[in-house]
Amino acid sequence: MDAEWQHQHIENHDDFLGLTVNSGIEQPESFSSESVTRFLSRKRKALLSVDEYVRGILEGNITVLSQAVTLVESSKKEHQIIAQDIILKCLPYSGKSLRIGITGVPGVGKSTFIEAFGKFLTNQGRRLAVLAIDPSSERSRGSILGDKTRMEELAADPHAYIRPSPSAGSLGGVARKTRETVILCEAAGFDTVFIETVGVGQSETVVHSMVDFFLLLMLAGAGDELQGIKRGIMEMADVIAINKADGDNIHKAELARVQYKNAMHLFPTADSGWTPQVFTCSAYAKTGLEQVWSAINDYTKLTGDNGYFRYKRSEQARFWMFETINDRLKSDFYLNPVIKAALPDFEEKVQREEISPFSAATQLLENYYHL
Ligand code: GDP
């Protein structure tokens, strides 16, 4: 036995008190060490240096941009450190794009519209990045925005860059990653950024906090309740476009336009001084796109002249500082091993009413601060 265990594992000796180790199995032939090495070298793409990433991005190299965005989205600490460095170095070259939020319920035609509107803009020589915030992917790992073949024509356009929603983490975390990706896209020379989201929950508020202009797509003939659009979202919109105004639907869309226009008048005047506009459009027939674009330009001119554009951006920057702090404090607390271990016990005691929720929270926080 003695001689044998020496050739195998020390853990398998009779005197060893820990776990034993099973003997391995023979490697199947197809798994030669060469193929494994080849596989690993393909999988583990060497990271570039921060300066190489920054140079690539500033040169408009889409492959390097994509790799940098992957680092931004990664939850690995070493990736985050590099990502933050890249963002910092790209920051002076960012900020020059027009950031447009696009929302609407599933089926309203967001992808079709973005493809048509996107092509309309790239044909005018603009460079467009399309990003997304998809709250569904975080919960179910399935995504509303990303799972179908979308925007094929735009995806093949050399002047467009489409990046699906980051999927891991809380809505705040996902949104922060998208906010950081905007910086990289701008440094890479994209002068127009679309941020798409599904208009059914909290995500449009978060998108509103990172865009200059907010476009809401709606359908004719469906009540607000049916479309799941809350009044608050309508209030955020700078333009409402009633989509699918084609074929038999043209008349209904026009009626809806008048109704929404009247409804918008009931909202208080926006701080921007801008009066929200309502149009009809068809992503199929490619109508109404010019009107939407011209409204965006009017808005930019107005808010540029009255100072609101800059004011909103500075407020958004402040907001994101606090969001990031909140996010970090929360995850540091909940991921702390001591807190993680103590939490279930406190939860139970609170549920059994042996301790008040406030006192439980205070004790946990005190524990955390004194660690
Ligand atoms: P999303 O879920 O909001 O991204 O919507 P899609 O772009 O996937 O469109 C949903 C459905 O509406 C698809 O079947 C589209 O072909 C259709 N659709 C999109 N835009 C239009 C339009 O302008 N007119 C008509 N008639 N149908 C459209």
Image (cartoon, grey):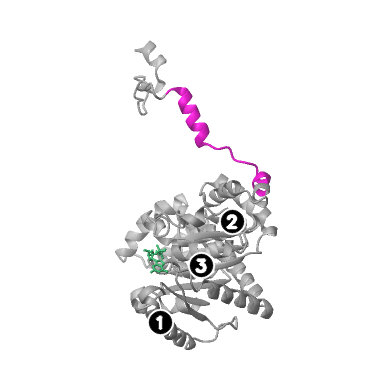
The structure residue drawn at horizontal position 37% and vertical position 68%, both measured from the top left corner, is 356
According to the image, label 2 marks what residue? 159
Identify which residue, 92 or 345, lies in the foreground: 92
At label 1, the amino acid type is Ala
Q: What is the magenta range?
A: 32-54
> Are the residues at dot 1 and dot 3 in contact (C-beta closer than 8 Å)?
no
Question: Does the numbered disc 3 mark a residue whose Cβ is under 8 Å from ligand 1?
Answer: no
Q: Residue 256's mark?
A: 1
At label 2, the amino acid type is His
Q: Nearer the viewer, mark 1 or mark 3?
A: 1
**Mark with earlier residue (1, 3):** 3
**Residue 68 screen position, x and y as percent:** 58, 49
At label 3, the amino acid type is Val
Dividing the image into 4 quarters, which one contains the N terminus? top left
Identify which residue, 288 or 168, lies in the foreground: 288
Magenta: predominant secondary structure element?
helix
What kind of element bears circle 1? helix
Visible in this render: residue 329? no
Distance between the alpha carbons at the discs numbered 1 and 3:
25 Å
**Residue 130 screen position, x and y as percent:** 53, 60
Distance between the alpha carbons at the discs numbered 2 and 1:
34 Å
68, above or below 176, in the image: above
**Mark with earlier residue (2, 1):** 2
Relative horizontal placement of residue 72, taking residue 341 as reference (left or right) = right
Q: Nearer the viewer, mark 2 or mark 3?
A: 2
202, above or below 266, in the image: above
What kind of element bears circle 3? helix
**Residue 312 screen position, x and y as percent:** 61, 73
According to the image, label 3 marks what residue? 207
Visible in this render: residue 28? yes
